[in-house]
Amino acid sequence: MSAGETLIDVVRRLDDDRPKFVAIDGHSAAGKSTLAAEVARPLEAAVIDGDEFYAGGTEELWDAMSPAEKAAHCVDWRKQRRVLEALARGEDAQWHSYDWDAGDGRLLDRVTVCPPAPVVILEGVYSARPELADLFQLRVLYDAAPELRHLRWVNREGEGYYDDWARRWSEAEDWYFSQVMTPDRFDLVLPAE
């Protein structure tokens, strides 16, 4: 059974009449977005991209932080919480996404709107963080070997981009997955394909 088929089966067996909230977490380039897209249609799920909640900041600001500080501040989990809480109440959730093209901390002018759905998936690094644990019925670690993640990064963004990203962010992710969200804290660990 593939990772997607396993996840669909597990979500369908969740014993809850309320909408089901699922976090798909894992290192960068593990394939979280691809997995979320694969399971979204069969589950009638709304998928929220955790990268839209990047906190922003200058290179100097991030480079001055410890790995623990980066992991704590990289994603605006408070904004994610407000979005998930609105959906849990059966309301539309609205937010302004980080403007990756501007890259200077600005948010996009347009509002992203997500209507309630039977299943809500928040995918992205740090999505299963403890501050959001009470909102999820299922927290999934999509676990990919470092070699696979490196290959995906290079294919997607290029070697130079990977080197810059790794210098700034890999220690923060390593700290998060070794100190905050170790594999035993997840409800389900799926090997990346």
Image (cartoon, rainbow, N blue to C red):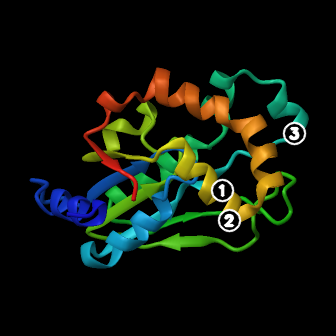
Q: How many marks?
A: 3
Residue 156: mark in rendering: 2
Q: Residues within 10 Å of mark 1 (few under 14, many from 20)?
A: some
Mark 3 residue element: helix
The mark nearer the N terminus, 1 or 3, is 3
Q: Quadrant of the C terminus?
A: bottom left
| Contact check, label 1 and label 3, Cβ < 8 Å | no
Q: Quadrant of the N terminus?
A: bottom left
Q: In the rendering, at what x and y percent does residue 45 appear?
A: 33, 71
Q: Most extreme residue toward the right, as rendered? A: 60
Q: Residues within 10 Å of mark 3 (few under 14, many from 20)?
A: few
The mark nearer the N terminus, 2 or 3, is 3
Q: Residue at x 57, y 54 (%)?
A: 29
Q: Residues within 10 Å of mark 2 (few under 14, many from 20)?
A: few
- 158 sits to left or right of 42: right
| Contact check, label 1 and label 2, Cβ < 8 Å | yes
**Nearer-the-camera pick, 20 or 12:** 12
Residue 153: mark in rendering: 1
Q: Can you see residue 52?
A: no
Q: Residue at x 87, y 41 (%)?
A: 58
Residue 181 position by quadrant: top left
Q: In the rendering, at what x and y percent does residue 139 appear?
A: 32, 44
Q: Which residue is mark 3?
A: 59
- 1 sits to left or right of 94: left
Between marks 2 and 3 in the image, the one whose residue lies nearer the viewer: 2
Q: Marks 1 and 2, how far apart in space?
A: 5 Å
Q: In the rendered structure, which amino acid carries the disc numbered 2? A: Arg
Q: In the rendered structure, which amino acid carries the disc numbered 3? A: Glu
Q: Most extreme residue toward the bottom, as rendered? A: 41
